[in-house]
Image: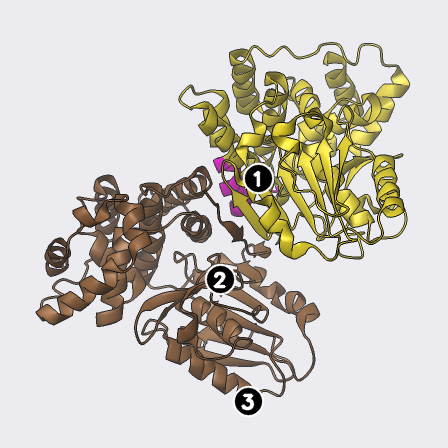
Chain colours: A brown, B yellow
Amino acid sequence: MSYKNFPMVPRVIFGRGSFNQLSEILAPKRSGINAPFIYLVDDVFKGNPWLTSRIPLAYEDRIIFVSTEKEPTTTQVDALVEDIILTTKALPSGILGIGGGSVLDLAKAVSIMLTNEGEAKDYQGWDLVKNPAIYHVGIPTISGTGAEVSRTTVLIGPEKKLGMNSDFTPFDQVILDSELTKDVPTEQWFYTGMDCYIHCVESLTGTYLNTFSETYGNMALELCKEVFLDNNLSQIESQEKLMMASWHGGMSIAYSQVGVAHAMSYALAFLLGVKHGIGNCIVFDHLEEFYPEGVKVFKAMKQKHNIVLPQGICADLTDADFDKMITITLNLEPLWENALGKSWKSIITPQKLKELYQKM
Amino acid sequence: MSYKNFPMVPRVIFGRGSFNQLSEILAPKRSGINAPFIYLVDDVFKGNPWLTSRIPLAYEDRIIFVSTEKEPTTTQVDALVEDIILTTKALPSGILGIGGGSVLDLAKAVSIMLTNEGEAKDYQGWDLVKNPAIYHVGIPTISGTGAEVSRTTVLIGPEKKLGMNSDFTPFDQVILDSELTKDVPTEQWFYTGMDCYIHCVESLTGTYLNTFSETYGNMALELCKEVFLDNNLSQIESQEKLMMASWHGGMSIAYSQVGVAHAMSYALAFLLGVKHGIGNCIVFDHLEEFYPEGVKVFKAMKQKHNIVLPQGICADLTDADFDKMITITLNLEPLWENALGKSWKSIITPQKLKELYQKM
């Protein structure tokens, strides 16, 4: 038996308003006046001086606004890297991601591709990255994905939705300032928070579970329940607790694995472009059979916040489409093995998957 | 308001038997055949081949057995550093600590002093360390102190008991193998576990508390209750959970502060050489006034495990001794402020402290 030697984020700062310390954090990391800091910022913040005016631009530093309408792709990473190389005089001093899971994953991927040859798609997989990434900083503005602590960066490539999973992927620095999440719209807040809730349920009920993951998962799950079910928190407490839930939840799956909802929603994302948070919710809503207690609580949270999930997203799919989704999801073998054990193939058949997708 | 930018341990491996992966972990860190790995090992493992035969010695690597009868001192650190410098041809590739909090703290301090001039006592304080330490690895063999994640290394110097608190102090690598804790004697298991329990109570009830610390502290406290109060765990589960309690508890105080028990037991350690774990227990047992719920649960745990604390350890002290202890403890201002708020000086007077010490 061999255990993972997990790379943790080596620096973290937590606190309401800690974003204001960005300038002092970056100062010693600047490698020269021609080596800028490049900020990838979720374009919801475009024209929002409350945030953008506090980004400490100097010399050639610049902001690149990123649309997160769609899941991030390997071609998007390649285009960003090419743009950065063509427009900067020296390798950047650092790449900063300010946004949700998509932007954080883009920042991680770009920082890797600036020091590794070829195209982003070549690195989708486990431990394919050869060289250390450029210094990169993650600043979440929405909570739940765990992208701020994870060892992966999930990208849609030409052939698969899969992360660059490597020891060089985790951020060198994370800033956890819950104030940055204050204007997230309710639905997005719910879907992204549920990403955390769902991956904790998957981790805690999985066959890969170990005490390390379990303690982080339990903590994150408790925090999700406090935030989404109980009624005892102030807005600030709720934002801070959800940020910590995301952090601990990310640690939990990093040392174990996700399960059925993630396996099935990956295929929805690949074929239909369904975003990760809402995709997980759409799938998880139909998984009573696998996660009875988890789904019951999920439905209670959904009801409490008047969330109505899209229906019939698979209604117009052809048999070929279903076959493709089924192939994609069944390829995620570790997720199925974690969820259902070594003999998972006898439990989750293509026919069973098709019936599940048809309900969605 | 400025928040701490906390350095986390950048690599952690967790699992029963993960100690066997030490060789593969160290291989890429060897800087030359003349640059040995030096193992500081708690001398309880002397003549215990179950552990020592698995230490992967090569080239000039060697084991130095360390007595932990007493709290580690700055002169002990200086002697170890001198010995290492005189007996190795090149700066070591790494320093490994295999033991409890004392050995882990010694390993951290030695790794710092190998690259920083002067004597260990010069670095007792906050952020006095100038140069990065040598690569250092922490392998706890008893759970509770949190030394495996902390940013400090607590040493008794000529003038004070105080840590080298710096960004260079945390381990570069931690191995969490609960099997290494299997032979800890009951009393030591209890006292060291209570170090975790007590610092979590101090953190969670303190005025410095924040959501980051709170989530780690809650997690650790729950685990302590499972281990020391409930009766539902197998031995292995109990060892694994206590190891995680120590980890999370360390994170909790790292981002907040300890309180009355630690402040008072530091002085007992300095004057009487009382070790940290038992010292905290002796003090905490008399702190109902400050931590009513925490002390109640502590007494229940003590009773459950038939622990009888030493009595009358201050019986023979002179007034001058009391004055010295009182001066030492009152100097730990952040601990008192955390415990009792900004006007702590009106609550905890020298007379009050003397009365408390006289009970012990």
Measure the alpha-carbon separation of dots 1 and 2. 22 Å
Q: Quarter of the image containing the N terminus of chain A?
A: top left
Please name the amino acid that badge 1 sits on: Phe
Q: Chain of mark 1?
A: B
Q: Main secondary structure of the magenta part?
A: helix
Using the image, determine if residue B58 lies above or below residue B295: below
Label ID, residue A87: 3
Q: Which residue is mark 2?
A: A166
Crowding around mark 2 (Cα neighbors within 10 Å: few <14, some 14 to 19, many 20+) is many
Q: Residues within 10 Å of mark 3 (few under 14, many from 20)?
A: few
**SS state under label 2:** loop
Dot 2 or dot 3, earlier in sequence: 3
Residue B19: numbered disc: 1
Badge 1, how many Cα within 10 Å: few under 14, some, many 20+?
A: many
Residue at screen point 82% across, 27% down = B270
The residue drawn where x is 68% and y is 33% is B101
**Residue B209 shown in magenta:** yes
Front residue of B258/A37: it is: A37
- Real-space Cα distance between discs 3 and 1? 48 Å
Residues shaded magenta:
B208-219
Camera-nearest label, 2 or 3: 2
**What quarter of the picture does the C terminus of chain A occupy?**
bottom left
Residue B255 locus on image (x, y percent): 61, 46
What residue type is disc 2 on? Answer: Ser
Q: Is residue A39 left or right of residue B132?
A: left
- Kind of element beneath mark 3: helix
Q: CA distance from mark 2 to mark 3?
A: 28 Å
The quarter holding residue B302 reads top right
Residue B118 is at least partly visible in this image: yes
